[in-house]
Image (spheres, grey):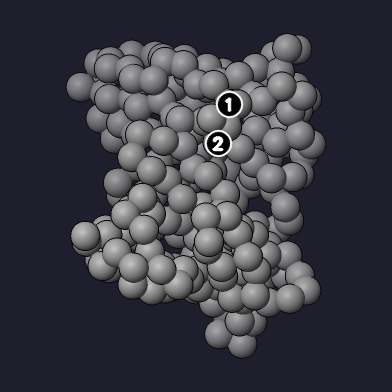
Amino acid sequence: DSGVTQTPKHLITATGQRVTLRCSPRSGDLSVYWYQQSLDQGLQFLIQYYNGEERAKGNILERFSAQQFPDLHSELNLSSLELGDSALYFCASSFEGEGEAFFGQGTRLTVV
Amino acid sequence: AQSVTQPDIHITVSEGASLELRCNYSYGATPYLFWYVQSPGQGLQLLLKYFSGDTLVQGIKGFEAEFKRSQSSFNLRKPSVHWSDAAEYFCAVGPSNTGKLIFGQGTTLQVKP
């Protein structure tokens, strides 16, 4: 158990809908990273937050957004969902802006 | 362009046999290199990492990896594979010891009894 908690574990929704994925980092970790793992794109870095502020941005679509709250948990919001958004979404956390990242077990999103 | 290539999508080895998983990278700056393992239904677990110094690094679960700058490679090895090693293995590169990484496509390891 990495100490990173992601909810829900599975999510099935229809095209055009909006969903929110939640991540609770390890106790004391200030940095949260979001990744998308799909069959065609592999593991892709989406975005990083550090202590509530956006730190780095990767291949994140404009339909996707994230935030980190004062209690350091993070949410990834996915809107206007398309079939191609079906993937496993991972959250990882590290103590500082840099440092070994610990991954959660992921949220499997299926868009039908 | 920055990228990581894992040439082998799928590898099958017999239990007790040695293992080598290949990883090649393309990175403009000094790379920080990582190997992660993903078991079915699990998140990614860090096996080992290389930043500098000795080019042969030891990790958890009996794994080791060797950094070869001239070949832009960071291959993962294990002398004797156990059935519990069956999983997907990812090589990754980053600008520092960070969670912001570029991952390879992964190699699925199957272990025959």
Task: Name the residue located 57 percent from the left edge and 55 percent from the top edge.
Answer: B60
Q: Amino acid at mark 2?
A: Phe
- Seen in the picture, residue A56 relative to B87 is either above or below; the reply is above
Mark 2 residue crowding within 10 angstroms, few (<14) / some (14–19) / many (20+) = many
Residue A37 coordinates in the image, percent (x, y): 40, 41
**In the displayed image of the protein, which residue is found farthest to the bottom?**
B70
Real-space Cα distance between discs 1 and 2? 6 Å
Residue A79 located left or right of residue B57: left
Residue A76 seen in this snapshot: yes
Mark 1 residue crowding within 10 angstroms, few (<14) / some (14–19) / many (20+) = many
Residue A85 coordinates in the image, percent (x, y): 34, 32
Judging by the rendered image, the residue that carries numbered circle 2 is A103
Q: Earlier in the sequence, mark 1 or mark 2?
A: 1
Residue A4 coordinates in the image, percent (x, y): 58, 26
Judging by the rendered image, the residue that carries numbered circle 1 is A4
Q: Amino acid at mark 1?
A: Val
Residue B85 located left or right of residue A31: left
Task: Tell me the chain of label 1.
Answer: A
Task: Name the residue located 33 percent from the left edge and 17 percent from the top edge.
Answer: A11
Q: Which numbered circle lies on residue B46?
A: none
**Quarter of the figure with the C terminus of chain B:** bottom left
Q: How many marks?
A: 2
- Seen in the picture, residue B70 relative to B30 is either above or below; the reply is below
Describe the element under mark 2 as helix, strand or loop.
Answer: strand
Task: Tell me the chain of label 2.
Answer: A
Q: Quarter-wise, where is residue A45 in the image?
A: top right
Residue A66 seen in this snapshot: no
Residue A29 located left or right of residue B13: right
